[in-house]
């Protein structure tokens, strides 16, 4: 048997290779560096380049619940895990977390899911939330550990008895590569300050409230340019339509920058970053902006308030409130260049002290060391 095959194997799964590369890449490289062989699982095979390990395309839809399709996904996960025989399954996003953990239970493999956000169904409640709660409860029942990215999501899952308190682990998000996201000097304003939104263009991300706030500020002739960077037309029931986006751009309310795998150039040209989301796990867009040294404007909701200290490294504003968001932008506009720079420096200190990538890798290795030891006995 080769040295490569003697390494303990991990199966790592998410709803896209893009997600694994852009949000979990540092962790994946850290696990490979720690001596694990990796099998990476996601549906979009064309995006698996640039990561260590062997990629396997596994069809799955990230939106909705289709019993037939989800049964096929569960069966495919079971077959894959029985074939790979990893020491553990690591997963992110709802479908891999639920059906991956259920498959791991059936295959006798430990699963370490990561609840990086609750998604549209949990935010909106109703019957779909009840169904998802039942699925989470069944999927996570035998997991040795379940990772969460903010304490409020953790407490919610414990209160709903979806996980037991002793299973729950709190992580500092996905971690930030502080060398790659280095501090960048604040750009000159030229009389116009650029406020950047980074993320999927979804209603649940507060994009419509952001545009409504931009409309208020445009009437006031405020010196601000609102920029959107992220995927449009994604498979989500709250997705912004192409017609909406085109109308906003035509009316001069926003500039649409498209989407990019590397957000650093856009962050370097921005004077601040805004996230009006309805709820987050721990928003990577804020962490990366903070690492670059940009003030943070975010809704006062779980996840966002874990990163933003009001009037220290940014401003918090009421969720779903265009006027509250407009007022936060007004306060930010009134800052002097030196005050904005100081707020950006405070944001950088926040990620250095609490949200580095090394902390996330260490937390995973702590759980995996115990599992590898059990597998070898």
Image (tube, rainbow, N blue to C red):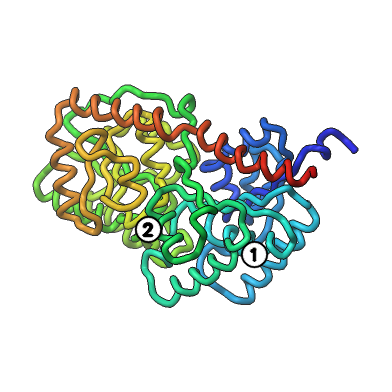
Name the front one of labels 2 and 1: 1
Is residue 131 shown above or below 104?
below
Callout 1 secondary element: helix
Q: Which mark is residue 56?
A: none
**Residue 243 x, y percent position in the rendering:** 34, 62
The foreground one among 3 and 206 is: 3
Q: Compare marks 2 and 1 and give the one earlier in the sequence.
A: 1
Residue occupied by mark 1? 102
Q: Position of residue 77 (x, y in %)?
A: 70, 61
- The x, y position of residue 184, in whole percent, is 36, 24
Image quarter of residue 283: top left
Classify 125 as above or below 292: below
**Which quadrant does the C terminus fall into?**
top right
- State the residue at coordinates (55%, 39%): 363
Element under label 2?
Answer: loop
Q: Is residue 184 visible?
A: yes
Residue 256 visible in this rendered orientation of the protein: no
Residue at image coords 12%, 34%: 334
Q: Residues within 10 Å of mark 2 (few under 14, many from 20)?
A: many
Number of dots carrying numbers: 2
> Which quadrant does the N terminus fall into?
top right
Closer to us: 194 or 351: 351
Q: Position of residue 288 (x, y in %)?
A: 41, 36
At a point 27% along the width and 33% down the height, the residue shown is: 271
- Residue highlighted by disc 2: 202
Q: Is residue 40 above or below residue 3?
A: below
In this picture, residue 37 sits left or right of residue 251: right
């Amino acid at each position: 048997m080769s040295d490569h095959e003697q390494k303990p194997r991990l199966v790592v799964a998410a709803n896209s290779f893009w997600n694994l590369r852009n949000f979990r890449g540092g962790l994946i490289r850290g696990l490979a560096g720690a001596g694990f062989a990796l099998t990476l699982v996601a549906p979009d095979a064309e995006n698996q380049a640039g990561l260590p390990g062997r990629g396997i395309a596994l069809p799955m839809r990230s939106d909705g619940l289709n019993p037939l399709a989800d049964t096929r996904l569960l069966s495919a996960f079971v077959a894959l895990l029985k074939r790979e025989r990893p020491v553990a399954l690591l997963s992110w996003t709802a479908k891999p977390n639920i059906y991956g953990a259920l498959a791991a239970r059936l295959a006798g493999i430990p699963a370490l899911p990561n609840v990086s956000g609750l998604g549209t169904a949990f935010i909106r409640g109703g019957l779909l939330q009840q169904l998802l709660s039942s699925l989470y409860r069944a999927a996570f029942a035998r997991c040795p550990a379940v990772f969460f990215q903010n304490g409020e999501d953790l407490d919610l899952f414990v209160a709903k008895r979806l996980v037991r308190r002793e299973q729950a682990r709190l992580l500092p998000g996905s971690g930030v590569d502080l060398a790659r996201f280095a501090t960048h000097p604040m750009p000159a304003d030229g009389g116009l300050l650029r406020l950047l939104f980074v993320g999927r263009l979804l209603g649940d991300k507060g994009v419509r409230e952001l545009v409504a706030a931009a409309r208020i500020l445009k009437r006031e002739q405020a010196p601000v340019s609102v920029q959107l960077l992220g995927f449009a037309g994604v498979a989500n029931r709250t997705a912004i339509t192409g017609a909406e986006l085109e109308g906003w751009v035509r009316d001069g309310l926003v500039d649409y920058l498209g989407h990019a795998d590397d957000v650093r150039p856009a962050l370097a040209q921005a004077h601040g970053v805004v996230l009006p989301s309805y709820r987050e796990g721990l928003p990577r867009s804020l962490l990366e902006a903070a690492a670059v040294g940009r003030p943070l404007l975010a809704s006062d909701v779980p996840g966002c308030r874990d990163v933003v200290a009001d009037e220290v490294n940014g401003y918090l504003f009421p969720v779903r409130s265009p006027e509250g968001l407009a007022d936060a932008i007004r306060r930010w506009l009134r800052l002097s260049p030196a005050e904005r720079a100081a707020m950006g420096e405070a944001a950088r200190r926040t990620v250095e002290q609490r949200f580095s990538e090394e902390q996330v890798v260490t937390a995973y290795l702590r759980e995996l060391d115990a599992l590898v030891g059990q597998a070898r006995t």
